[in-house]
Image (cartoon, helix red, strand yellow):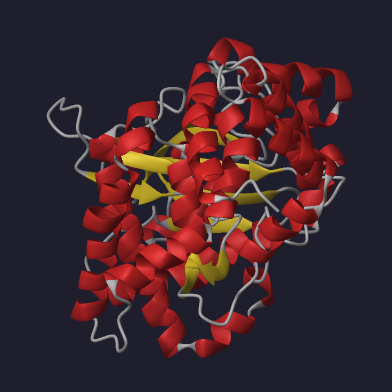
Amino acid sequence: MIIEKNNCNIPEYLDGTFFKKALVSRIKCDDVEIKGLHFTMGSSGGENYLSLIYRVRISYKLPNLPQGDETFIVKSIPLGGAKEIFADMNIYEKEKEMYFNIMPKIEDILKSIKITPRCYYAVDNPIATIVFEDMKASGYEVADRIEGLNEEHCKVLLTKLGRYHAGGMMLLKQEPSIRENYLLKHGIISSVSFSPILWGKYWDDGISRLANHASKWLGYEKIVGKLRKIHQNGIFVERIKDSMRISKNDILTVCHGDTWVNNLLFQYEFNEESPTDVVLIDFQGSIVGSIGLDVNYFLHSSLQVDVFASKRKDLIRNSYCNALRTTLQKGGFENIPTVQDIENEIERKAVYGFMATIIVLPFVSMKKEDSGDSNFETLSEESSANRLKDSACSSPRFLETMKILLKEYDQCGMLDF
């Protein structure tokens, strides 16, 4: 067997035995011989904070057939050291639950609508690892996280998100017990993990840095005072935590939980710049929760500045609401929420979106030369973390987005308490 590592640091367990089991699961034939493994990295440094992603081309031989090839995406999730806190969140178990149990049911409800790549194989030891279908061969790729998504990309994503949420709503109707699934109680960012040792610290650091930047902007003097007050007072953090908890009138679905641009693969055809489809990846943060969480998280983390400034309401109504309601109607769902119901729900959860602009957007929009090989370990070491946070909170898209958002939130009273 020929193994080409191409200067990649490949764990020993990712060997011929591992990939034979994965391949057998894919092709449904035990009598297969692995002839070669060709490794490349599936993501660059600074693009993935919790996992190591490999693209592996497998050459294999079946009896009486020519040699075949199959390409997999392999996601290795080492959760030791600084990332051990995420092991306590059961992110690997959650992702397995989503790919092997929840997503097949949702896609069955939605029939011909593809939401996510197929998952072929998973192991718990020695390192939690999941093997996926490689979507690159079908023309899917990640969009530009630094600039953010233009209007056409947003339309495609919000249409797919509306259909996915509708499928989740119908699944919860069919199987109400899913609401009690302990793996879907809390996401990566949750009312539990929003503590001073994790996301609470990111929030405090982000608000402080934002206030320092805003103090240099003409016409933001009163807003800066409110930001300083938010930084000093824990009441606003409680509002964020409340937005994550299920309320009596919430429109509930199975949320993706981490809808930023790097967790979206867009399909392009014939060298066109506008996408024709999108699939969601990375279900480590999935929860049963309000539809408003995913929508706000996406809108506040992944849009180009001009789209964020003027297109959000149109995108919600014409793409997301339309897809959600149409899919529910086709599925015979009772008590379909009105457009106003959906818009009100998203507005009620807007503080969750504000949180995403402070904690997520800075790192999403950071220049590649600044992000380097950043990961959760580097963000856990104080000196490197401060350097990265300074760079992240100085990115043009973050600052221009915040100029728009702070005025908007000040006018509606969100910054007051």
- Above or below: residue 287 compared with residue 143: below
Relative to 324, is 391 above or below? Answer: above
Residue 150 appears left or right of 379: left
Q: Looking at the image, which residue is at 61% across and 17% down?
A: 394
With respect to residue 90, does 217 lie above or below? above
Q: Give the image location of residue 341, x and y in percent.
A: 36, 72
Residue 253 seen by the camera? yes
Q: Residue at x 40, y 35 (%)?
A: 303
Residue lying at the far top in this picture: please name it. 369
Please name whichever residue, 66 or 284, is drawn nearer the observer in this view of the structure. Answer: 284
* Image x and y of residue 52, in percent: 63, 35
Q: Where is residue 62 in the image (x, y as percent from the top left)?
A: 35, 49
Instruction: Choose top left, top right, bottom left or bottom right for residue 283.
Output: bottom right
Residue 300 pos. (x, y %): 49, 42
Rendered image quadrant of residue 106: bottom left
Q: Residue at x 34, y 45 (%)?
A: 312
The answer, for residue 33, to whether it is visible in the render is: no
- Left or right side of 276 for 191: right
* Residue at x 65%, y 25% (from the top left corner): 221
209 lies left or right of 52 = right
Return the residue nearer the eye: 347 or 138. 347
